[in-house]
Image (cartoon, helix red, strand yellow):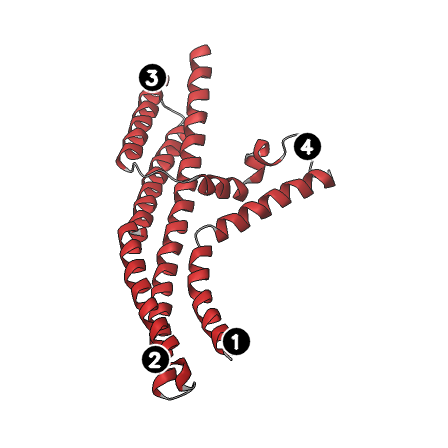
Amino acid sequence: MEIENHLGDYTNALKTKMWITRGVRFEAYNHYLGKHALSNFAISFFSAYVIIINFLSIYKVVSSDFNLLIQFSTMTLSVLILAFSQLESANDYKLKAERFHDCSKEISKLLNELNFLLSKKNISSYSLEQNIKSISDQYDIVIQRFSENHSAIHYKAFNASYPYDFPNEFLIGYSSDTSDVKSLKVRYWKIFKIDVQAFLQPRWLYFLLILVPPILFILAIILHP
């Protein structure tokens, strides 16, 4: 009985670990895929800004006094495009996203195998133990093969998606009773903060890069004496 209980505890711990890792890796996949898309958007916008600013001079939309500003702006943006493209290419967010996605899919396959194994009724304890150990070993191999580690925000975002499965993350010092209004407010406030952080963390820099250049250029035109 003690051996069976020990195996049950081990199996539950393994299932939980695999389920969490799969979910967190999938969060990381979405994170880096979003960064890859925004990176391309930022480079495209920078390139468009260079063309648009040159059009202002060609079609004399602004006075000739702005020619120096236009030349400086186009040269600055061109250098920024080159530097930013090199940095983003080195990070290779798309490859990171694919690696995390492949990892989560392989863990999902192992988790399905484990659930199917546990659903079998006519299986000896020895055979069950050996199969569970095999799945655990395969899981370790997958983790070693996909050695890229996720960040803390990926783990937090996954937890926020399943708050009832992680009560200690959201209700420390508060009741888990859903009728407790104060506890519910605390829970949903923490979830909201995590969702905002998960949304902004991979995006804020790109938003700034896309929005700041035209704002500065417009202000320069408005404030020009």
Q: Looking at the picture, which amino acid does disc 3 mark? A: Tyr
Q: Which residue is labeled 2 in the image?
A: 54
Contact (Cβ within 8 Å) of mark 4 with mark 3: no
Query: Which residue: 31% across, 33% down?
Result: 143
Q: Which residue is mark 3?
A: 126
The x and y percentages for residue 32 are: 37, 51
Given residues 137 and 209, the one toward you in this image is 209
198 with respect to 76 (left or right): right
Work out which residue is located at the far front of the displayed protein and give it: 225
> Element at badge 2?
helix
| Residue drawn at (58%, 46%) of the image | 193
Name the residue beneath numbered marker 1: 223
Q: How many marks?
A: 4
Quadrant housing residue 108: top left
Q: Residue furthest top?
A: 2
Up the image or down, 153 lies above or below 56; here it is: above
Q: Secondary structure at mark 3?
A: helix
Numbered mark located on residue 174 in the image: 4
Task: Please state which amino acid type lies under the numbered disc 4.
Answer: Tyr
Badge 2, how many Cα within 10 Å: few under 14, some, many 20+?
some
CA gap, disc 3 and disc 1? 80 Å
Give the percent coordinates (x, y) of residue 186: 66, 40
Provide the secondary structure element on which disc 4 rests: loop
Residue 104 is drawn in which quadrant? top left
